[in-house]
Amino acid sequence: MNTMGWGRKDQGPSEAFAAEEQARADGLARRCDEIAAALSHPMRNSLEHYQAAYRNAAGNAAAHTAQPEAR
């Protein structure tokens, strides 16, 4: 039995979580740009992982942001 509420379809948006994830996405985007700009960057081999983390954070932010109701 899932008592934590994980994966519940009736959960509404969580603006606090969305804001945290947006801030994380923004930081990861800056980090990706920094890594991509320098061919000799020590994290160059991890760029795809940073990009995946960015996509995850941005997706979480979008999924948990309240959307205006369609008319």
Image: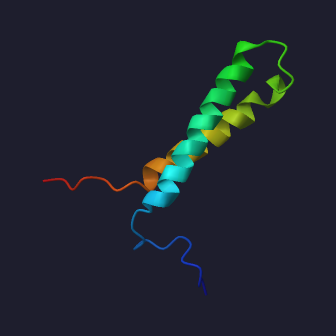
Residue 65 vs 58, above or below: the answer is below
Residue 38: quadrant of the picture? top right
For this view, does 44 lie left or right of residue 17?
right
Residue 56 vs 41, above or below: the answer is below
x and y, in percent, of residue 55 in the image: 58, 40
x and y, in percent, of residue 71 in the image: 12, 53
The residue sitting at 25% across, 53% down in the picture is 68
Residue 20 in view in this figure: yes
Residue 26 vs 8, above or below: the answer is above
The residue sitting at 56% across, 72% down in the picture is 6
The residue sitting at 60% across, 31% down in the picture is 29
Residue 55 in view in this figure: no
For this view, does 58 lie left or right of residue 46?
left
Residue 64 vs 23, above or below: the answer is below
Residue 33: quadrant of the picture? top right
Tell me, what colour scheme is on the image? rainbow
Along the viewing direction, whichever of 66 and 19 lies nearer the viewer: 19
Q: How many marks?
A: 0
The residue sitting at 87% across, 23% down in the picture is 42
Along the viewing direction, whichever of 38 and 55 lies nearer the viewer: 38
From this viewpoint, which residue is outermost toward the left? 71
x and y, in percent, of residue 1 in the image: 61, 87
For this view, does 24 lie left or right of residue 35?
left
For this view, does 34 lie left or right of residue 56?
right
